Amino acid sequence: IEKIQQAAADGRTAFSFEYFPPKTEEGVENLFERMDRMVAHGPSFCDITWGAGGSTADLTLEIANRMQNMVCVETMMHLTCTNMPVEKIDHALETIKSNGIQNVLALRGDPPHGQDKFVQVEGGFACALDLVQHIRAKYGDYFGITVAGYPEAHPDAIQGEEGATLEAYTNDLAFLKRKVDAGADLIVTQLFYDTDIFLKFVNDCREIGITCPIVPGIMPINNYKGFVRMTGFCKTKIPAEITAALDPIKDNEEAVKAYGIHLGTEMCKKILASGIKTLHLYTLNMEKSALAILMNLGLIEESKISRPLPWRPPTNVFRL
Ligand code: FAD
């Protein structure tokens, strides 16, 4: 948070990269090579996700430690709090504290694969608010705490095409405010593809008295199937022009990537023009698209990365 505030005070745009724990040892080594290259561009922080219910606990802790102490980047570790006893949560917090990590993204978590609902373990936590309160009560101000925000409301509150009702959206915002009032310093949002929805969300947060920085979570479209899966899971609204641009190119991986970079760049430009000066990139452990977007925005040097593919409207380029 201090790094983000400092960047704002200096008039700089801050950006950050999110990664997830790879499944194989080779994947982990590849990730660190990629991270080394990406960190050279000066992100304010990088974060590593936590498998729901602690399913990646050991690996997430190991990667977080290596990020902070060997990659030498300010590290934020995600931590979910359901399906897990409090001792396991405290073990994670003690471990990162002893490794010098000072940032936690406090989350409820989704149910593990194959389960519809998450289970509150006896004496355990039911929601992210419980975790924020626990961290502040037990660790004081040692940790900077980030929480998740949902510009379209949490998927549980979204019914069908219409999205969340005004009541569900309002309740969601009020719950977000409780997390901030309980001690969260920063909000990182769920992915979105309609920038106006995000900008409205920020205004709505400000109107109910949420004053901390709100960082947009940007997920570059890397491949069509992944995009459909992810936006289906998160119940994300897709503006008609995005569907129209993707439809004719969905089987052309390179074209989809190029469009993803173009779209990500345009979204970020609009966000930055609104006065928000921080961007969070969901990298999905890939470097090209995230770096290309930052390069297009003039936030990193072109010489350090290979040139991205240009994107042109599909009618000109992909007509057979
Ligand atoms: P909460 O803030 O607890 O809230 C979830 C919903 O329930 C909200 O709609 C809220 O309004 C409602 N709610 C909950 N409790 C109450 C209450 N007491 N009173 C009223 N309303 C309540 N998942 C992972 O497993 N690992 C990760 O690393 C991970 N990283 C993420 C990073 C980001 C930036 C985001 C946006 C999500 C991430 N997730 C991750 C997914 C997240 O765990 C799920 O979206 C989960 O379903 C909700 O987590 P939360 O912390 O937002 O929940």
Image: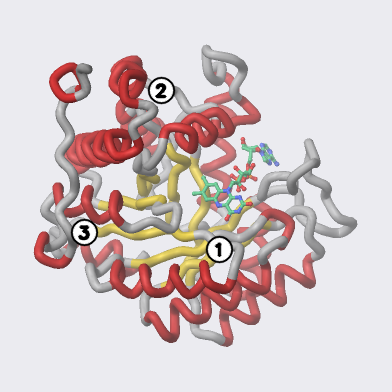
Ligand 1 image-quadrant field = top right
Q: Is mark 2 within 8 Å of ligand 1?
A: no
For the C terminus, the image quarter is top left
* Residue that badge 3 annotates: 8
| Mark 1 residue type | Pro
Would you call the spot at circle 2 few (<14 residues within 10 Å), some (14-19), or many (20 or more)? few
Question: Residue at position x 14%, y 48% from top?
Answer: 296
Of circles 3 and 1, the one toward us is: 1
Task: Tell me residue 62's x, y (percent).
Answer: 58, 78
| Disc ID at residue 238 | 2
Secondary element at image label 1: loop
| Labels 3 & 1 near each other (Cβ < 8 A) | no
Residue 135 vertical placement versus 82 (above, below): below
- Using residue 313 as the reference point, say whether residue 199 is left or right of it: right
Residue 52 vertical placement versus 73 (above, below): above
| Labels 2 & 3 near each other (Cβ < 8 A) | no
Of circles 1 and 2, the one toward us is: 1
* Residue that badge 1 annotates: 22
Question: Residue at position x 36%, y 19% from top?
Answer: 247
Q: Nearer the viewer, residue 105 or 133?
A: 105
Q: Which tag, 1 or 2, sits closer to the chain's start?
A: 1
